[in-house]
């Protein structure tokens, strides 16, 4: 009989009104990379939260067996003692502490069991940073390094706990291609050093590249586990298991009805709000037409989000110059409210802190930017609010117990659908979408693409930022390429290829 480092047997987990996991069993081999894939809300993160002690023993049915021993973890500390570490999609680092302080937080090094040994802390951090190839000084504050480097700090933090099983939930969702490749190569290196990884990812090209086994979960049940070099692990096969049907085309067709220029940004310059000598956006000029989907492509740090935020009511900072023109008229906007009242909407990439009120329910999040539509004499018509929320819940297939479920209790992809719903309901003329499908599975992506196309066909102007180049190429009529705060190229749909986009970036230096 095959020996496994981990077995999860017949795991069933209930939430109010929902069976999140239904008799799920998986086996993970030592020194392997095991991928979990499935649609948003399928139960992947819930299963890993059970394993890591986030959901303690007694709140679920079934057994966890680690190295042949049945375990019932009452908290994260107990799972870590067995060599299990989880890195969530939202990183658990303290921004104002240094790299070294974060690495040993809750796992402090001491010589006598009472007083922290900063000498040991620093020496061990230096050694481990070298192992993962992170070239940053250990005293650097976490807030001063990029997301890809923060991911590496999380991995080092896990290594400091003598990790045997490393769980990563959407580790590359916020990374560009280069940083993603570096992280995946690191996981392969860790495998060579005896560390088993379980990775949750919607990026199927990455899964097929590094995983030894792939378990497909749908609606809280295991559909199948595929093994590399034994089964067909093509993306098409995995997608069929995830969504229960063939998906021949990732991007829905659209009837193009492109009208006159409706939105322009002219001679746009912006400076960093924390350091107003730092010129972040330099002489940006762009336009978009009615019924057109315009893409903003570029590497991480190119300035695309800063452009979106600065245009949307100057929410990026105050030292900004230039013109925003809509339908031939210059707009004067100082706040997000000004932008909304002028027919603009901005769906942020940061849904947790800036896109949603997590303590509020789905209904209230959807209606919030458009309360005047469902109010009379400043009193909200709750029946109308419920009707609107139900309409968007059905239209975007938001998986939930109902519109009164707290948004913070939804899966990441379903939260993203709520963000999308609230801005569509606000009925803007210009919709700026910043990473609209980040952390969303292929089936849900198709639904969101279909809604984007519907809006374009109705004559709305869409500006789409995405780090996934195939998405930009598959959805956009025209693409502006950004690098280091400048627009360095403009490509029509027919001339846009991965090579032509990278050519614009590389030749801009």
Image (cartoon, rainbow, N blue to C red):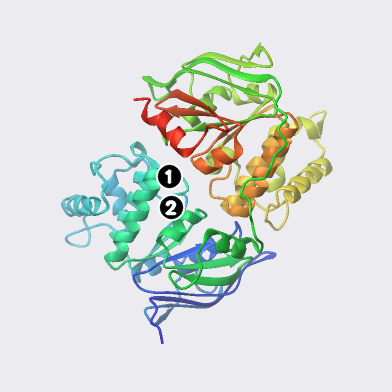
Decide: is 241 above or below 27.
above
Indicate the secondary structure of the residue bearing disc 1: loop
* Residue 250: mark in rendering: none
Residue situated in front as seen by the camera: 210 or 388: 210
Residue situated in front as seen by the camera: 282 or 247: 247
Number of numbered tags placed on the structure image: 2
One can see residue 365 in this view = no
Judging by the rendered image, the residue that carries numbered circle 2 is 171
Residue visible at 67% across and 48% down in the picture = 447
Give the quadrant of the N terminus.
bottom left
- Residue 167 in the figure: left or right of residue 259: left
- Residue 300: quarter of image: top left
Residue visible at 50% across and 64% down in the picture = 36
Decide: is 408 above or below 299.
below
Residue situated in front as seen by the camera: 61 or 323: 323
Indicate the secondary structure of the residue bearing disc 2: loop
Spot occupied by residue 306 in the image (x, y as percentages of width and height):
48, 28
Spot occupied by residue 254 in the image (x, y as percentages of width and height):
70, 39
* Residue 175: mark in rendering: 1
Spot occupied by residue 32 in the image (x, y as percentages of width and height):
37, 69
One can see residue 447 in this view = yes
- Residue 69 in the figure: left or right of residue 425: left
Spot occupied by residue 243 in the image (x, y as percentages of width and height):
64, 61
Report crowding for label 1: few under 14, some 14 to 19, many 20 or more residues within 10 A (C-alpha).
many
Residue visible at 52% across and 38% down in the picture = 466
Report crowding for label 2: few under 14, some 14 to 19, many 20 or more residues within 10 A (C-alpha).
many
Decide: is 49 above or below 388.
below
Label 1 – label 2 distance at C-alpha = 8 Å
User: Do callouts 1 and 2 mark residues in contact (Cβ within 8 Å)?
Assistant: yes
């Amino acid at each position: 009989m095959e020996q496994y480092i981990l077995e999860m047997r017949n795991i069933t987990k209930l939430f109010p009104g929902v069976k999140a996991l239904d008799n799920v069993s998986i086996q993970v081999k030592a020194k392997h990379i095991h991928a979990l894939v499935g649609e948003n809300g399928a139960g992947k993160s819930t299963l890993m939260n059970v394993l890591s002690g986030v959901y303690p023993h007694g709140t679920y049915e079934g057994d966890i067996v680690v190295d042949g021993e049945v375990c019932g973890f009452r908290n994260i500390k107990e799972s870590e003692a067995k060599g299990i570490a989880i890195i969530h999609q939202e990183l658990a680092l303290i921004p104002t502490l240094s790299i070294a302080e974060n690495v040993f937080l809750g796992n402090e090094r001491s010589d006598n069991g009472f007083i922290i040994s900063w000498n040991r802390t620093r020496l061990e951090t230096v050694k481990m940073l070298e192992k993962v190839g992170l070239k940053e000084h250990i005293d650097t504050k976490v807030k001063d390094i990029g997301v890809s480097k923060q991911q590496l700090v999380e991995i080092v933090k896990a290594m400091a706990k003598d990790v045997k099983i490393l769980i990563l939930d959407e580790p590359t969702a916020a990374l560009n291609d280069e940083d993603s490749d570096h992280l995946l190569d690191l996981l392969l290196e860790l495998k060579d050093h005896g560390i088993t990884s379980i990775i949750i990812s919607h990026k199927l090209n990455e899964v097929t590249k590094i995983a030894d086994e792939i378990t497909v979960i749908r609606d809280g049940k295991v559909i199948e586990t595929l093994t590399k070099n034994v089964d067909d692990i093509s993306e098409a096969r995995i997608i069929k298991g995830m969504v229960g049907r063939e998906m021949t085309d990732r991007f829905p067709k659209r009837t193009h009805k492109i009208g006159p220029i409706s939105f322009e940004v002219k001679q746009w310059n912006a400076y960093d709000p924390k350091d107003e000598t730092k010129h972040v956006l330099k002489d940006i000029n762009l336009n978009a037409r009615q019924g057109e989907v315009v893409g903003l492509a570029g590497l991480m740090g190119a300035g695309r989000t800063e452009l979106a935020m600065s245009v949307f009511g100057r929410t990026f900072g105050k030292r900004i110059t230039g013109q925003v023109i809509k339908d031939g008229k210059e707009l004067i906007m100082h706040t997000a409210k000004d932008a909304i009242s002028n027919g603009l909407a901005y769906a942020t990439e940061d849904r947790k802190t800036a896109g949603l009120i997590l303590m509020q329910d789905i209904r209230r999040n959807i209606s919030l930017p458009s309360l005047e539509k469902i109010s009379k004499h400043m009193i909200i018509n709750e029946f109308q609010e419920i009707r609107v929320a139900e309409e968007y819940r059905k239209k975007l297939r938001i998986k939930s117990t109902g519109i009164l479920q707290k948004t913070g209790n939804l899966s990441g992809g379903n939260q993203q659908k709520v963000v999308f719903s609230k801005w569509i309901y606000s009925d803007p003329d210009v919709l700026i979408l910043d990473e609209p499908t980040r952390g969303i599975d292929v089936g849900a992506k198709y639904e969101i693409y279909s809604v984007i196309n519907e809006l374009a066909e109705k004559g709305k102007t869409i500006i789409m930022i995405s780090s996934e180049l195939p998405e930009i190429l598959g959805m956009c009529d025209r693409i502006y390429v950004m690098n280091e705060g400048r627009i360095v190229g403009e490509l029509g749909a027919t001339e846009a290829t991965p090579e032509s986009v990278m050519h614009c970036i590389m030749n801009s230096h």
